[in-house]
């Protein structure tokens, strides 16, 4: 009886719209709309297709790693980065979508933000848009938030719907570019003032590395560029933590946090994300470095 009432209310809220927006999306800011780059990249992704490189991570991944640049340098790459993708959710995506027989190298964009966020934004986005129902339920269960029940309910009704919107500047292969440059001043001093990593993320990060080791999947950790105006000291504990995992699992780290020639005025569109020009320069450098580590990619 209770489930029937809940389903009825959900159906009404889903199918009744105001100004083109279903009521359900007006009920909670935690609900992510169905559509956009996440929906499209998972709908287009073929796990059984051969790729030289698979990219995983948050918005810094899907806005910073351009498959066109990889292709121009002889590498087939697919970008499975998603909005605010916390490391715990990266683990569930990796387990479902990585194919050891078809994917030569995984590049995991590791960033402090992916280890300190509660992950709800990422969970909402994936529940709404990931093709795999298994991943949707896993991230919901791991989140342990009652709001995920509504997210799963909306997902159920969306299976008969068309995507509600398309992402501008989406590039086939999972990348979304931004052509703008910095338009505002940033509070560099406050950037990641909170830098305590969550144990749940560290647990799943280790589980991800164990999974790759067991499946013999080659993996490299990448620290995407930051503006040089950001406090370097704030990231030292995180870098040292990643170095410990590097040593334990014998995997490469490509640390470009502050080791780059990019300019905040020309190559970033905000304090954390590269614009199209910056991403192109970064990817060319990264490709050179990974080919040194993995000659078989040449």
Image (spheres, helix red, strand yellow):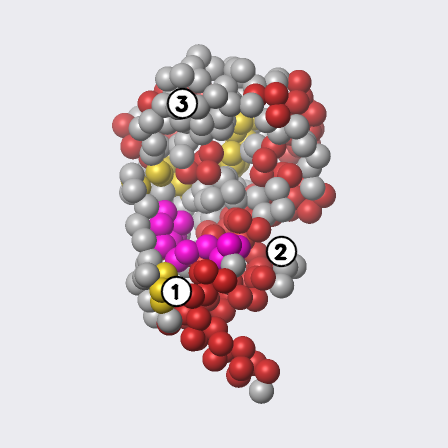
Depth order, front residue of 85/206: 85
Residue topped by disc 1 = 22
Horizontal arrangement in the rendering, residue 80 relative to residue 40 (left or right): right
Which span is picked out in magenta? 29-42
Q: Is residue 267 visible?
A: yes
Q: Nearer the viewer, mark 1 or mark 2?
A: 1
Residue occupying image coordinates x 69% and y 47%: 200
Q: Earlier along the polypeptide chain: callout 2 or callout 3?
A: 2
Q: Earlier along the polypeptide chain: callout 1 or callout 2?
A: 1
Describe the element under mark 1 as helix, strand or loop: strand
The quadrant of the picture occupied by the N terminus is: bottom right
Give the farthest residue toward the front: 19
Describe the element under mark 3 as helix, strand or loop: loop
| x then y, percent, for residue 88 | 60, 47
Q: How many residues crowd mark 3 within 10 Å: few (<14), some (14–19), many (20+)?
A: some
Is 40 within the magenta? yes
Depth order, front residue of 214/192: 192
How far apart marks 2 and 3 lie (CA) works out to 34 Å
Residue occupying image coordinates x 45% and y 65%: 24
Residue topped by disc 2 = 143
Give the farthest residue toward the bottom: 1
Describe the element under mark 2 as helix, strand or loop: helix
Tell me whether the residue at label 2 lies in contact with that at label 3, contact meaning CB atoms closer than 8 angstroms.
no
Instruction: Count the numbered circles shown.
Output: 3
Residue occupying image coordinates x 50% and y 39%: 57
| x then y, percent, for residue 189 | 61, 21
Residue topped by disc 3 = 182
Horizontal arrangement in the rendering, residue 274 relative to residue 256 (left or right): left
């Amino acid at each position: 009886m209770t489930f029937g009432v809940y389903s009825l209310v959900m159906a009404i809220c889903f199918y009744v719209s105001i100004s083109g927006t279903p009521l359900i999306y007006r009920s909670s800011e935690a609900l992510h709309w169905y559509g956009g780059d996440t929906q499209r990249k998972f709908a287009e992704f073929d796990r059984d297709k051969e790729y030289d490189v698979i990219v995983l991570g948050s918005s810094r991944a899907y806005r910073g790693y351009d498959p066109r640049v990889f292709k121009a340098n002889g590498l087939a790459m697919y970008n499975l980065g998603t909005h605010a993708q916390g490391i715990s959710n990266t683990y569930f995506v990796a387990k479902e979508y990585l194919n050891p027989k078809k994917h030569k190298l995984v590049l995991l964009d590791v960033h402090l933000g992916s280890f300190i966020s509660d992950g709800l934004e990422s969970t909402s986005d994936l529940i709404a848009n990931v093709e795999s129902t298994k991943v949707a339920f896993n991230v919901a269960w791991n989140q342990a938030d009652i709001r995920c029940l509504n997210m799963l309910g909306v997902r159920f009704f969306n299976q008969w719907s068309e995507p509600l919107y398309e992402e501008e500047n989406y590039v086939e292969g999972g990348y979304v570019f931004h052509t703008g440059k910095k338009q505002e001043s940033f509070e560099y001093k406050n950037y990641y003032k909170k830098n305590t990593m969550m144990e749940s993320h560290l647990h799943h990060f280790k589980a991800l590395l164990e999974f790759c080791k067991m499946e013999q999947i080659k993996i490299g950790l990448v620290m995407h560029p930051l503006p040089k105006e950001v406090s370097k000291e704030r990231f030292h504990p995180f870098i040292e933590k990643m170095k410990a995992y590097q040593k334990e699992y014998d995997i490469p780290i490509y640390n470009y946090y502050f080791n780059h020639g990019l300019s905040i005025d020309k190559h970033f569109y905000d304090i954390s994300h590269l614009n199209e020009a910056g991403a192109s320069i970064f990817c060319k450098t990264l490709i050179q470095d990974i080919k040194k580590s993995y000659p078989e990619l040449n």
